[in-house]
Amino acid sequence: MAKSATTIAAGTVIRGRIHGEESIELLGRVEGHVEISGSLTVDAKARADAEIQAASVFIDGIVVGNVTAEDTIHVTGKAIAAGDLTAAKIIVDDGARIRGFVKMTGAPKTRQKPSTTRATAPAATVPPAAPDQDEDEPELPSSASKRRVSVKKR
């Protein structure tokens, strides 16, 4: 029988290091470092200010920090991700806001030479946001790449 994911409830804030073998469903907030063998799901109203390492990561809320997944990172259209994303497969839904470097490493669990992908759509220069325009946009972590990429849906 498969175990269900550990749930970090809404209104809960965890500061520090989370290390484990199981999956986590984040409904509250985590600040620090998350390293799990299972998957991490960041709910629409959740926030992770953390360096994240997991088998797969599903982001529907806010993540500030670098995210590394063995298999897949999925960023939904309502999500905000500020930090570098590294995984074998990266899915970005229309409307998602990403600030950082996106790196796809190839097939999961097959150690190939990592390759950096670039958007094939024409890159547009993104002007800096006016202070009152994006007050809810999180700061990019200092360890993240400063490159900006804009991808337009065809």
Image (cartoon, rainbow, N blue to C red):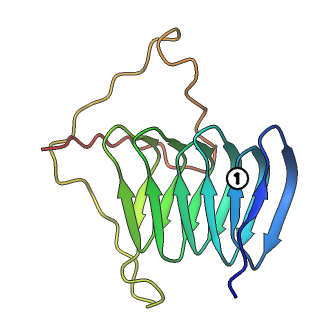
Q: Quadrant of residue 123?
A: top left
Residue 134 horizontal side relative to residue 105, left or right: right
* Point 21% across, 40% down: residue: 152
* Point 24% across, 53% down: residue: 119
Residue 2 horizontal side relative to residue 133, left or right: right
Residue 146 horizontal side relative to residue 17, left or right: left
How many badges with numbers are in the image? 1
Q: Furthest residue to the bottom?
A: 110
Q: Mark 1 highlights which residue?
A: 26
Quadrant in which the C terminus is drawn? top left
Q: Position of residue 98 (x, y in %)?
A: 44, 42
Q: Furthest residue to the top?
A: 132
Q: Amino acid type of disc 1?
A: Leu
**Viewer-proximal residue among 84 and 77:** 77
SS category of the residue bearing label 1: strand
Q: Position of residue 112 (x, y in %)?
A: 40, 88
Q: Furthest residue to the left?
A: 154
* Point 45% across, 90% down: residue: 111
Q: Residues within 10 Å of mark 1 (few under 14, many from 20)?
A: many
**Viewer-proximal residue among 12 and 98:** 12
| Residue 40 vertical position relative to residue 128 in the rendered view, above or below | below
Quadrant in which the N terminus is drawn? bottom right
* Point 67% across, 42% down: residue: 46
